Image (spheres, helix red, strand yellow):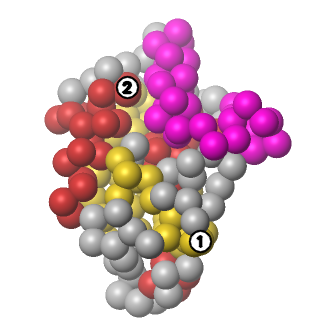
């Protein structure tokens, strides 16, 4: 078994849609990034890549490469899942947390779980997604950005 940890952060800006866990979340602001800036999927990918000793998403999908401009992070997650399979690993489970003051994410969490699981070809019972606030503290609490943490167990 192998364990990996992932962390990602993106700035909230006016303009782009907010996508978390591959799910469009209605909100007046979105996350800024080279791809769709899905902070949750990015943290999950980093956890999976870390578990197999394959660096991070920046090494695999650099923000300097125009191929990845505006790409759905779930497309990148699929590629990471394929890499895991080629190396002989399967996902045991993933546990992730989104840190955001707003919007309230509770109603979207089940769809995020299902989307991540579907893309990786695993059961939604193997994926857990939570959300929390920082009680108004720090950049997340001030609404400047969002962060996500993830751990993954591979077998």
The reply to whether the magenta stretch includes residue 11 is no
Mark 2 or 1: the one toward you = 1
Residue shown at 54% from the left, 23% from the top: 79
The N terminus appears in which quarter of the rendering?
top left
The C terminus appears in which quarter of the rendering?
top left
Residue shown at 44% from the left, 53% from the top: 19
- Report the magenta residues as a range: 59-87
Left or right: where does residue 110 sit relative to residue 91? left
Q: Does dot 2 land on a helix, a strand or a loop?
A: helix
Q: Does dot 1 land on a helix, a strand or a loop?
A: strand
Residue 151 in sight from this viewpoint: no
Q: Position of residue 121 (x, y in %)?
A: 32, 21
Residue shown at 48% from the left, 25% from the top: 78
Residue 2 in sight from this viewpoint: yes
Q: Main secondary structure of the magenta part?
A: helix
Name the image quarter holding residue 92: top left
The reply to whether the magenta stretch includes residue 78 is yes
Which label's residue is closer to the chain start, 2 or 1? 1
Q: Position of residue 93 (x, y in %)?
A: 30, 35
Categorize mark 1 by other alpha carbons within 10 Å: few (<14), some (14-19), many (20+).
some
Q: Position of residue 14 (x, y in %)?
A: 57, 72
Residue shown at 51% from the left, 30% from the top: 75
Specify the label residue 13 is tagged with: 1
In the figure, 149 relative to 151: above or below?
Answer: below
Categorize mark 2 by other alpha carbons within 10 Å: few (<14), some (14-19), many (20+).
many
Q: How many marks?
A: 2
Specify the label residue 78 is tagged with: none
Residue in front for this viewpoint, 20 or 13 = 13
Q: Position of residue 99 (x, y in %)?
A: 41, 68
Specify the label residue 120 is tagged with: 2
């Amino acid at each position: 078994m192998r364990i990996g940890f992932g962390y990602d952060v993106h700035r909230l800006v006016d303009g782009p849609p907010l996508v978390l866990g591959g799910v469009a979340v209605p909100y007046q602001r979105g996350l800024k990034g080279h791809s769709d800036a899905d902070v949750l999927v990015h943290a999950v990918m980093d956890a999976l890549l870390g578990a197999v000793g394959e660096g991070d998403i920046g090494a695999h999908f650099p923000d300097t490469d125009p191929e990845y401009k505006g790409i759905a992070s779930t497309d990148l997650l699929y590629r990471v899942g394929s890499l895991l399979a080629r190396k002989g690993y399967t996902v045991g489970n993933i546990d992730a947390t989104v840190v955001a003051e707003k919007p309230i994410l509770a109603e979207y969490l089940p769809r995020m779980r299902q989307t991540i699981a579907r893309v990786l070809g695993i059961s939604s019972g193997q994926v857990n997604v939570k959300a929390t606030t920082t009680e108004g503290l720090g950049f997340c609490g001030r609404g400047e950005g969002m962060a996500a943490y993830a751990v993954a167990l591979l077998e």
